[in-house]
Image (cartoon, grey):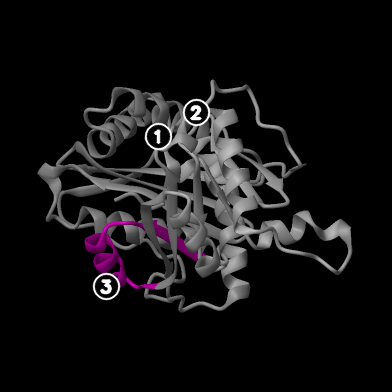
Amino acid sequence: MSDADPTLLRRLEAAHYRIVGALYGCRSRLTAHGLWIRSDHVDDPEWNHLGRLESAGEEGRASRGRNRVLPTPDEVLDTATERARQAGRRPTVALSSLSRRRELVGALERRGWQPSYRHVWLIAAEAPDARGVDPDPPPGVTIHTVSGAAMLADFLDVFREVFAAGDAEGAAGYRAALEASTHAGDDTVVVHYLAACDGAPCGIASAVYVDGVAGGFNLGVLPRARGRGVGAALTARRRARARRAGNDLVYLITEDPAVEASQLRRGHRRAMTTEGWSLQASSPQGELDPPRDEPPADVEVPGDAGGERE
């Protein structure tokens, strides 16, 4: 269930796709059946799916007059399958609190799609750091804003160990995406943070700002440093600086109940959930064609491109 009003959620979701475009190299195309998003770097359903199934569809049909007819669930799934096949990705749709969830779930189950992830979206409530005052980290912990090649290399090493251990291909893709994110456009600000414990890199976090919305991603702490308050310190620093930069809406996404519980204690509240459904490769419909350079576009959304992966 959502604790936020639909207007706020639409603003949040629209900003989110632009944010992940900057962070993970995601391109997006607005179609009559939803917003198709794919990453240039990472083969992961989180960053390759058909989403915003109601609001994007409405925008895509705006020129057809007021008597708009929503696409059928089968049309939505056909679009997701075709787009994914063209890009060499697994067909995935993302159902949010703004989606026609009940109607679409029946079609997904009937056609053999299966749940692939469930994300909880959390919004930072007003807190003592809401005015943008940097809180002090725990003893022995320092937090740096990543700058320069050496510090970025340390950030990427921690990312690989926390999020992509044993996945060389995935680690290389995320590395390329995060390196590229440091050159985001003028309308998007990407900030990476590196925590050091007794002088050695031990934790990371990222934040992206666009249109007064700040998204928090990549919060991770090395096993040897857990229990020292590193994650809490990174969260507080990231949130304080987002407020100081003028962002009135600060959010993060997680699929881990333990992370959700810890962030609720740190001053966040639930906004909505997103469910990813994928067509498995074992299904006859799940076989993918060789990728093309670019799926055909109905309407291009420049710069528009969805988590806290703690």
**Residue identifier under label 2:** 288
| Three-letter amino acid code at the position of disc 2 | Leu
Residue 89: in magenta span:
no
**Residue identifier under label 3:** 265
Give the vertical position of 57 relative to 204 (above or below): below
Disc 3 and disc 2: Cα gap in Å? 43 Å
Nearer the observer: mark 3 or 2; the answer is 2
Along the viewing direction, whichever of 141 and 58 lies nearer the viewer: 58
Q: Quadrant of residue 67?
A: bottom right
Q: Is residue 117 left or right of residue 71?
A: left
Give the mark nearer the N terminus: 2 vs 1. 1
Q: Is residue 61 left or right of residue 186?
A: right
Disc 2 and disc 1: Cα gap in Å? 8 Å
SS assignment at label 3: helix
- Whether residue 150 is visible, yes or no, is no
Report the magenta residues as a range. 249-269
Along the viewing direction, whichever of 163 and 140 lies nearer the viewer: 163
Q: Position of residue 186 (x, y in %)?
A: 66, 42
Give the vertical position of 9 relative to 161 (above or below): below
User: Where, quadrant-wise, is the N terminus in this rendering?
Assistant: bottom left
| Three-letter amino acid code at the position of disc 3 | Arg
**Residue identifier under label 1:** 281
SS assignment at label 2: loop
Give the vertical position of 295 relative to 204 (above or below): above
Local crowd at mark 1 within 10 Å, few (<14), some, or many (≥20)? few
Do the residues bearing badges 2 and 1 touch, measured as CB atoms within 8 Å? yes
Q: Residue at coordinates 30% horizontally, 71% vertically from top-left?
A: 264
Nearer the observer: mark 3 or 1; the answer is 1
